[in-house]
Image (tube, rainbow, N blue to C red):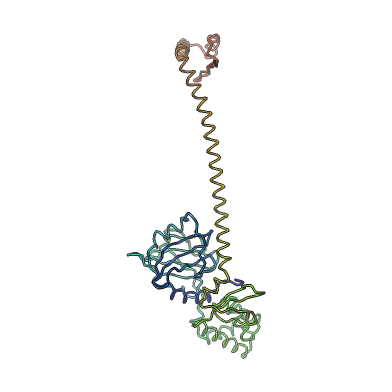
Amino acid sequence: MKRVFSSVDVLALVSELDGRLSGARIEKVYQLGEKDVVFSFRRGGVGRIDLLATSQFAFVTGSHPEVPREASNFAMKLRKHLTGGFIRGVRQHGFDRIIEFDVEAGPEKYTLVFEFFSRGNIFLLDSDGVIKALLEWQKWRDRVLGVNQPYKHPPEAPNPLTLPPEGVSKGLTSSQKKAAAYLATDVGLGPFWAEDVCLKANVDREKKGSDLSAEERERLINSFVGLMQELRGPYKPYVVFRDGKPFDSLPYPAAAYESFEKDYTESFSEALDVLFGSDAWGAASREDDAASSAKRKKLTDLLESQKNALAQAGKDALEWKKLGDAVYANYAQLEELFQMIRKLRAEGQSDEEITKRLASNRLFRNLSKTEVTVVFEED
């Protein structure tokens, strides 16, 4: 996708997912790579449905990649709580890039949360809104996201669907921001759709809101109202092609792609699958392969280290056995030597004097405080 997955995209996707997944049973969860997670559902009369969620987008996919042999800790935690549970509803939080799934698993109720901004994240919340599992621990200026922490939404973004056109027009009149910037931030359309409103209105996106003429402002508001009508559906998703290759996918008509080749699809997920499908799976598989290779190397190095340690332990065992045999063979002489040292010390002789006295002993070599050095001759 050549643009950021926007709140407008999330709005269309949520409308689709609520219809397709409500009532579906969660069967499996797989983690592919670092931040790619597949949720496998089954729904009566439909069969298997796979939802791919990444840090930047999500969609129902028709592709079925090879899954890791070993489940990640995150996948295992989600399976523990969600397997066998049912999706009871899918919604967008306000007009943010956040999707929330209501899940009922036996007597327990959970909320599965996808965030598509910044580094992205996935959370599992209990009925009290406490985080039971998350893809990545994160700390923000206004919220800390970790296990057993209460989940807190980011500051809520403006919702253009709830803003009256006259309010948007009044805001434009006094705004010192560029027209597109005002629509993107103050109205909540995001960069792509804010610029699209300007294009359809034939208004310079760089022009300050306060500098717009009454006619320009009227055209801009009419264009904004037109987009709001499209957002309420029904939407017409499509894939945009450039040079014969998928370039972007959208749920609504965009002036920026008016002259481009398009392929309309049955669903927004299908359009996203055409755009991302093979690349998303490929990237996840490559990342998983890289992780597996690193893990295999680590295990190989560990095995080699253990082999070396075992070989050394074998050598050490032989040396200790030889030493033990020598001590046993000379036990009587050693006992006699130690008794002599104790006797001479009791008489008040120094270690240096005792060493000279015992110089002729075939086993004795040196005495130093608490240590006695002896030498055994090999046969």
> How many marks are shown on the rendered structure?
0
Quadrant containing the C terminus is top right
Q: Position of residue 255 (x, y in %)?
A: 62, 82
Residue reaching furthest to the right: 243
Where, by quadrant of the figure, is residue 41 drawn? bottom left
Q: Position of residue 254 (x, y in %)?
A: 59, 81
Residue at the (51%, 78%) spot, across then down: 266
Residue at the (48%, 64%) spot, across then down: 38
The reply to whether residue 186 is in sight is: no
Residue reaching furthest to the bottom: 215
Q: Position of residue 235 (x, y in %)?
A: 51, 81
Q: Is residue 240 positioned above or below 330 on the image?
A: below
Position of residue 174 in the picture relative to residue 340 (left or right): right
Q: Nearer the viewer, residue 54 or 299?
A: 299
Q: Nearer the viewer, residue 217 or 292?
A: 292
Position of residue 77 in the picture relative to residue 189 (left or right): left
Quadrant containing the N terminus is bottom right
Where, by quadrant of the figure, is residue 148 drawn? bottom left
The reply to whether residue 168 is in sight is: yes
Q: Position of residue 139 (x, y in %)?
A: 51, 60
